[in-house]
Amino acid sequence: MNKTACSTLMLLLVCVTLAACGSPAVPGDQTTQTIPAAPVARDTAVPTATQPATSTPTCTPTETPAATSTPTPSPSPTPTSSPTLTPSATPAPSPAPTNPPTPTAVATAAQPVPTPIPTTPRSQPHVFPETPIQAFDAEVFVRYLGLVRDSFRSAADEFPQIFSGSKKGDCGSYIGWIALWVTEAPGFEDVPPAWFSLYAEYRALIQEAVTTTWEINQVCGEGGGTVSDETDAAAQAFIERAYPRSEQMVLDALQLPRP
């Protein structure tokens, strides 16, 4: 409801109220004055006089929202022309590089040339002047290695008897052993490398056997006598070591490839 309609409605309500109440009566006056009713709007309903008076409603005017003005878009700025690029100054050409100085060769100390060390010749195993020398033969070597082993085994059994037992002073067995060691067991030439260490040990054992028991050889050569306790002890100690070692040497020789 707009403000004009609200004002008209309030005016009509006041008029109706006054008409209902009427003018106060004057004593002695029979004539009733009639107050003409105010014109009623054609489209407004007039309340009857019988309705009780009500409090006058207050119409709160409704604020009509003001129209929001649409801001006018500001014109886009006219694009300015891009600045013209000014070419940079052409760089001055670099001076041509000068040739670097040729490095001076530093004299180095002359490296000494190693002097080749001559190969030490293989030392030849010991042999006696009476020892026969022959070209190496694996089968002959193994056979004589076995005979030397047998002599050591016999000496290990008989030495205690020869020095202080039932064969005390008997030279028969010993003469047979020393003859094998000095004049029968051969020396060999051109022994293959695979066999050389075993052959050298074979000759070393024979030499030690003769050296250790040489006093026995002298006594027996003179027809009898007494052997010192030192020779007795040294000879028996040697045999106790040489016999088991000779057994192993025979086994090793059997495993070597035949040249």
Image (spheres, rainbow, N blue to C red):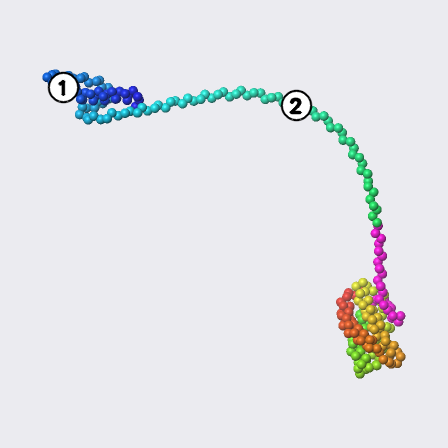
Q: Nearer the viewer, mark 2 or mark 1?
A: 1
Q: Which segment did they paint magenta?
A: 113-138
User: In the rendered structure, which amino acid carries the disc numbered 1?
Assistant: Ala
Identified at 83% across, 73% down, the residue is 212
Location of residue 244 in the rendering, given as x and y in whole percent from the top left corner: 76, 72
Location of residue 50 in the rendering, given as x and y in whole percent from the top left corner: 17, 25
For disc 2, the neighbor class at 10 Å (few under 14, some 14 to 19, many from 20) is: few
Reply above or below: 217 against 196. Answer: below
Q: Is residue 90 left or right of residue 20?
A: right
Quickly name the residue at label 1.
25
Identified at 85% across, 57% down, the residue is 118
Reply above or below: 74 against 258. Answer: above
Callout 2: SS: loop
Of the numbered discs 2 and 1, the one sitting upstream in the chain is 1
Q: Which mark is residue 87?
A: 2
User: In the rendered structure, which amino acid carries the disc numbered 2?
Assistant: Pro
